[in-house]
Image (tube, rainbow, N blue to C red):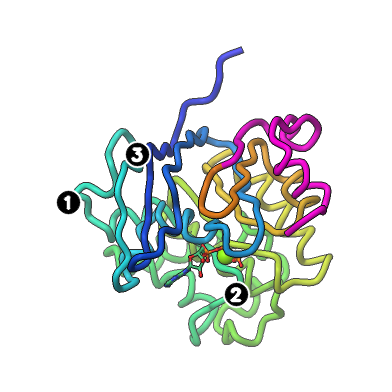
Amino acid sequence: MAENKIEIESRGLNLWYGDAQALKNITIAMPKNKVTAIIGPSGCGKSTFIRCINRMNDLIKDCRVTGELLFEDENIYDRVVDVVMLRKKIGMVFQKPNPFPMSIYDNITYGPRLHGIRNKEELDEIVEETLKSSALWHEIHDKLDKSALDLSGGQQQRLCIARTLAVKPKVILFDEPCSALDPISTAKIEDLINNLKRDYTIVIVTHNMQQAARVSDYTAFFLLGELIEFGKTKQIFEMPEETSTEDYITGRFG
Ligand SMILES: Nc1ncnc2c1ncn2[C@@H]1O[C@H](COP(=O)(O)OP(=O)(O)OP(=O)(O)O)[C@@H](O)[C@H]1O
Ligand SMILES: [Mg+2]
């Protein structure tokens, strides 16, 4: 069986915050149209790692990166890379839903407008399409001009996913997208992730082992800034090679 094409690959990636090294020699190849889960105890570098993928760490003072991170056969840390274009292709959804304080419609069309789309019909179409893809259309199609801040937490998070989809990314990064949500909203987001991988490559950080097992195809276990083990999720959960992986997934630490 042919393995999937690799979409994102880090090679010997190191990251320092000042003198403190937060990522140590991370080498990992994440397949296209699959979900890769990043797991590990608090402070092991999960958020730091996924923020590398769309260069969000650039915004942090004294943050330094060495090594390579390849996306579409290009090192995204290359000087010539246009970070705005990179973040259009590699979108991100955060732990806490963070809709803009404006209408639902304007939240979704914000990105497309920024990238030059002005045509009302085209914008309307993007709104409908992304709200359908994020399983929100039926709930909110008749209140698009209402403030996004009046939605429930779970709806806000799905709106943030719709906002990310609106600029047609290739990759979506999720940093603990469900940790502020109730179980029903969490199940909706998990279903959504399952559907989205047909069209996108997904990387998700989660503290929830059951969630990693349910939604991901591949799992990476991080510990103290190092990648301890990476493989098919089934293998990592059923037959981990490293004792520390087993200790973590069975809840013996972390
Ligand atoms: N902006 C920053 N400046 C300095 N150090 C930071 C910064 N962000 C994270 N760190 C440090 O880098 C290390 C990794 O942090 P990171 O946030 O990536 O961990 P994490 O695995 O996402 O943890 P959690 O599960 O708690 O979210 C930690 O030691 C943390 O204190
Ligand atoms: Mg984190």
Q: Which residue is mark 2?
A: 97
Please name the residue shown 53% across and 78% down the image. 99
Label 3 is placed on what type of residue?
A: Leu
Residue 229 among magenta residues: yes
**Which of 202/164 is in front?**
202
Q: Name the outermost residue toward the top.
A: 1
Relative horizontal placement of residue 219, taking residue 51 as reference (left or right) = right
Residue 123 image point, x, y percent: 42, 65
Q: Which residue is mark 3?
A: 70
Residue 204 image point, x, y percent: 60, 52
The residues tagged by marks 3 and 1 sit, at their Cα atoms, a distance apart of 13 Å
Label 1 is placed on what type of residue?
A: Arg
Relative horizontal placement of residue 68, taking residue 197 as reference (left or right) = left
Q: Could you say whether the residue bearing mark 2 is in a helix, strand or loop?
A: loop
The residues tagged by marks 2 and 1 sit, at their Cα atoms, a distance apart of 32 Å
Quarter of the rendered image showing ligand 2: bottom right
Q: Residues within 10 Å of mark 2 (few under 14, many from 20)?
A: many
Cβ at disc 3 under 8 Å from ligand 1: no
Residue 110 image point, x, y percent: 40, 72
Q: Could you say whether the residue bearing mark 1 is in a helix, strand or loop?
A: loop
Relative horizontal placement of residue 99, taking residue 88 as reference (left or right) = right
Q: Quadrant of residue 54?
A: bottom left
Q: Could you say whether the residue bearing mark 3 is in a helix, strand or loop?
A: strand
- Quadrant placement of the N terminus: top right
**Of tags 2 and 1, which is closer to the observer?**
1
Q: Which residues are magenta?
A: 228-254
Please name the residue shown 17% across and 51% down the image. 79
Residue 15 image point, x, y percent: 37, 55
